[in-house]
């Protein structure tokens, strides 16, 4: 019976970690893609484009995480604290992986928005970000830091 309980507990932890990582990917992805697109459209340097993408990734990640808490009548300060504690490390790992992939995938940062290499690079970056953040979220779920969705 205990083995069965552990199996289901591990399965539930994995599902919650997957859900938390997917949720993080949504916010980070929106911010990252908007930031890089803005940087390219405005002719900004690669570094400035990436910084804008990371800042927007954190902003959208936090914002999307806070919405359900605010709807559940949490005060802004309390919701922000919960999200900061439960999402900061996950977002940081995801954003780091995304930026590294964008930088080291040849041609991505110099490609135009209509170039398939740009969009392939974004897809690779988001996939890499998800794969990097999943183990972090699984660890946070097992430690009880991640909240139930």
Image: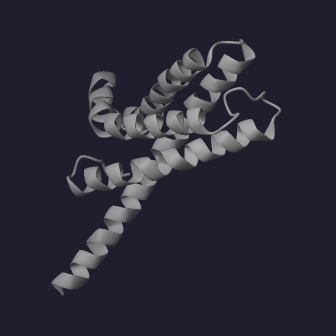
Instruction: Identify the residue at horizontal 71%, vertical 20% (top origin).
Output: 40
Q: Is residue 77 left or right of residue 105?
A: left
* x and y percentages locating residue 30 in the rendered image: 59, 33
Instruction: Identify the residue at horizontal 69%, vertical 24% (top origin).
Output: 37
Of residues 81 and 124, which is closer to you in this image? Answer: 124
In the image, is residue 68 above or below residue 139? Answer: above
* x and y percentages locating residue 99 in the rendered image: 52, 33
* x and y percentages locating residue 62 in the rendered image: 42, 30
Of residues 58 and 95, which is closer to you in this image? Answer: 95
Give the farthest residue toward the right.
114
Asked if residue 22 shows in the view, the reply is no
In the image, is residue 43 above or below residue 86? Answer: above
Q: Is residue 48 left or right of residue 145?
A: right
In the image, is residue 3 above or below residue 71? Answer: below
Instruction: Identify the residue at horizontal 24%, vertical 46% (top origin).
Output: 145
Instruction: Quarter of the image for the N terminus: give it.
Output: bottom left
Of residues 21 and 68, which is closer to you in this image? Answer: 21
Residue 3 found in image quarter:
bottom left
């Amino acid at each position: 019976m205990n083995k069965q309980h552990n199996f289901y507990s591990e399965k539930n932890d994995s599902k919650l970690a997957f859900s938390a990582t997917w949720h993080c990917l949504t916010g980070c992805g929106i911010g990252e893609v908007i930031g890089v697109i803005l940087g390219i459209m405005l002719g900004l340097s690669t570094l400035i484009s990436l910084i804008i993408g990371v800042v927007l990734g954190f902003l959208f990640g936090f914002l999307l995480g806070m919405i359900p808490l605010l709807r559940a009548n949490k005060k802004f300060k309390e919701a922000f604290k919960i999200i900061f504690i439960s999402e900061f490390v996950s977002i940081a790992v995801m954003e780091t992986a995304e930026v590294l992939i964008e930088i080291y995938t040849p041609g991505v940062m110099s490609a135009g928005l209509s170039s398939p290499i740009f969009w392939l690079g974004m897809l690779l970056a988001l996939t890499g970000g998800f794969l990097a953040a999943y183990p972090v979220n699984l660890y946070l779920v097992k430690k009880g830091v991640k909240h139930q969705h």
